[in-house]
Amino acid sequence: MQPRARSAAAKLQRVEDLLDAARVLAAERGGVRHVTLAGITKSIGLHPSAVLRYFASKEELLLELAERGWREWSESLDVHLEGVRGLPPPGTAAAVATTLTSMPLFCDLLTHVPLSLEGDVGIERARRYKANSFAAYDQAVACLTRSGTLSTAQVQDLVTVALGVTANLWQISHPTPTLAHLYTQEPRWGHAALDFAPRLMRLLQATAIGLAAQGE
């Protein structure tokens, strides 16, 4: 077992170690729904009770990953669209789809945040998540509006659709072992599980074109 972190720097590093362990387990086990506090602490050699010094619950730990995911997504849009202006609606949609699909953990967490994570933590932790995620959302909307021809309201609608569709398609395209086995027996049912990225791209581009047409 690792010794107890005592200095401020050691405590900050322990937090990062726990978050990194959760990321690895989510990737290895097929999603955050399979991540447990016991698995996290075991993977980095901590006693199970040690995690409670840094996170009150698994939900709080995963909400931290989601909060960071929002910031990372908005920053990735800034990088992806640096210097771009006058982007047509399909290009704006492509930027959203491309950056989202590059962040599998964030895509997965988009389902779990409203389902359980933000509602199962203390009110101050929920407040911090809301404040920081909305700040990142505002930054993403501003970036997309600045770089393209869609209005702010149209971009907001596009992002709303993007988040909902991403959350749904990500879960469908990463089935449990039971469903994966079922789809080998019934390929017709499983076809939708095979094309997350291209389907997201098609749907968001069609949405962006439709939003632009409504505004004409």
Image: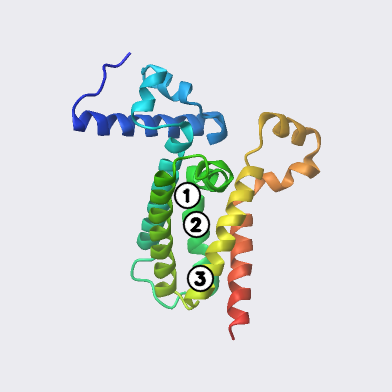
Q: Is 104 in front, or is 10?
A: 10
Which residue is disc 2 drawn over? 98
Earlier-in-chain disc, 3 versus 2: 2
Q: Alpha-carbon distance for marks 1 and 2?
A: 6 Å
Q: How many marks?
A: 3
Q: Alpha-carbon distance for marks 3 and 1?
A: 20 Å
Q: Secondary structure at mark 1?
A: loop
* Quarter of the image that includes the C terminus: bottom right
Which residue is pictured at 41% across the width and 50% down the height?
A: 127
Q: Marks 2 and 1: in contact by CB < 8 Å? A: yes
Which residue is disc 3 drawn over? 155
Residue 205 can be seen, yes or no: yes
Q: Secondary structure at mark 2?
A: helix
Residue 197 can be seen, yes or no: no
Q: Alpha-carbon distance for marks 3 and 2?
A: 16 Å
Which residue is disc 1 drawn over? 102
Task: Classify 136 as above or below 22.
Answer: below
Q: Residues within 10 Å of mark 3 (few under 14, many from 20)?
A: many
What's the image's color scheme?
Answer: rainbow
Between marks 3 and 2 in the image, the one whose residue lies nearer the viewer: 3
Q: Is 91 in front, or is 142?
A: 142
Which residue is pictured at 26% across the width and 34% down the height?
A: 12
* Quarter of the image that includes the N terminus: top left
Q: Is 187 in front, or is 178?
A: 178
- Disc 3 residue type? Val
